[in-house]
Amino acid sequence: MSLEHQGVLQDAFAEVSRFRTELYACLTARGDALFELCDALLCTDGPVRTLVDLALAPEHRRGHGALYGGLNQGRIDVARLRRALASMPLPRTADGRIVLAADVSPWLRPDANTCADRAFCHTFGRGEGKHQMIPGWPYSIVAALETGRTSWTAVLDAVRLEPGADVAAVTTVQLREVVERLVAAGQWKPGDPEVLVVLDAGYDAPRIAHLLSDLPVEILGRLRSDRVMRRPTPPRVYDPKGGRPPKHGGEFVFGNPATWGTEQSVTVTDTRLYGKATAQAWDRLHPRLTRRAAWLDHHGPLPIIEGTIMRLVVEKLPSGGVNKPVWLWWSGTSATAAEVNRCWQSFLRRFDLEHTFRLFKQTLGWTKPRLRSSEAADRWTWLVIAAYAQLRLARPLATDLRRPWEKPAEPNRLTPARVRRGFRNLCTKTGSPAGAPKPSRPGPGRPPGSKNRRPATRHDVGRVLVTGEAHTRPAHHRKGTKPRRTSGTDTVGRAP
């Protein structure tokens, strides 16, 4: 082992130990139980199927009652944990740029009528394989992306969307706080390249770019293929008939090539999976805003948010499907060929966040617990994020404990699931700041044969992205059923 490689391992070990100490300091109530629950999540063999199985792990020295007590009555200093995540080493592009991605992932709870703060979550591929709206807890997650083919991301923040919340408004505040924490932690300094934020088609990229215009960020978002943009305002020409000068230029219809005109930049790139990738860019295009929906309460004249429209077409798809063009909107203008390639390649890296969601749900068991309280769900979510952060820090230290049918991988190219297999050996070296459990006697519980005289309250299911209408649907929405009595006032809203 070279001295340089040994120094890298020592630095990685120090980072893991430092983060574990900071994580324990963030657990302000029932910290020992929560910390050992996080260790059990990291060291359990195989995927997490049920929450109570984690109490059987050797790293969890307490009973299953302490496990549920920590989630229900514990407290986590989320602000301090967010600062700890922002101060960790972050992945960067070749020019030193930080690339962030934001997306919403649901924790589905369709049959949990006693859970509060549920909202209808958009899903696809369940049951008949079509778009459905299923009750659950939607979480908006922001992560830093790596370059190249990888399944790793650096999760920096998570916010649960409450019923009636505007996704674009919540995401804007979330991104602002994340960028401010990165600046405070020294991850971005004046003179560095601006932070690139990549969004999918469900976000209003021009609106988010307008709200974050005072920060050193660039917004890159995908647009629907039926959008219509406007060209820059034409120069004012004297008209003897009078009238108000035009505010917008000609239309740029995505579905009508006759309106596109000549592009400002065209790039062709040979890729291994997609063949030739052709990207076209048109400069200084903006959407025509109207005073409705999100701009209903805007004071003053509506802004003109100019950007660059990019159209990406690939020669083939690995799955053999129809290679439809992808339309992107970038908040910058006067894009060069290098910037066009950087934008669409960064957008393709956004799908690495889907690998993180899959790891959270299928391996770490993020959505497996059937918790009633949304606050307990938030605590469990942050424990999963903290566990994933430790896996990312332990990448150089992990040993490849591969299965006989798996291909060998380089030490620093292991997937998160393969790093988790060897984390138990690392956990014994770092130690645990949690105190030893104290002997206690379990409570008597409910007497056998007695009935529950305090039934749990049933809650309505709310909606997300609501504008000027009721955001709840009563629990008796099914035809032919009687209304249920709830603790609050029933608000009727149409189904999404």
Image (tube, rainbow, N blue to C red):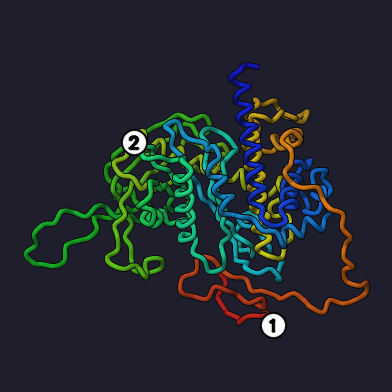
Drawn side of residue 198 relative to residue 15, left or right: left
Q: Does label 1 or label 2 sit earlier along the sequence?
A: 2
Viewer-proximal residue among 126 and 117: 117
In the picture, the disc for residue 270 is none
Q: Quadrant of residue 13?
A: top right
Q: Residues within 10 Å of mark 2 (few under 14, many from 20)?
A: some
Q: Position of residue 117 (x, y in %)?
A: 62, 68
Q: Position of residue 487 (x, y in %)?
A: 66, 80
Q: Residue furthest top?
A: 2
Circle 2: residue type: Val
Q: Quadrant of residue 5?
A: top right
Name the residue at 43% across, 37% down.
97
Residue 398 to residue 322: above or below: above
Drawn side of residue 161 relative to residue 439, left or right: left
Viewer-proximal residue among 115 and 394: 394
Drawn side of residue 30 relative to residue 118, left or right: right
Name the residue at 90% across, 68% down.
444
Q: Position of residue 375 (x, y in %)?
A: 65, 62
Q: Position of residue 401 (x, y in %)?
A: 75, 30
- The kind of secondary structure element at disc 1 is loop
In the picture, the disc for residue 266 is 2
Mark 1 to mark 2: distance in Å? 62 Å
How many numbered dots are placed on residues in this image? 2
Viewer-proximal residue among 330 and 431: 431
Q: Quadrant of the C terminus?
A: bottom right
Q: Residue furthest left?
A: 240
Circle 1: residue type: Arg
Per the image, the residue denoted by label 1 is 485
State whether residue 226 appears in this view: no
Residue 15 to residue 407: above or below: below
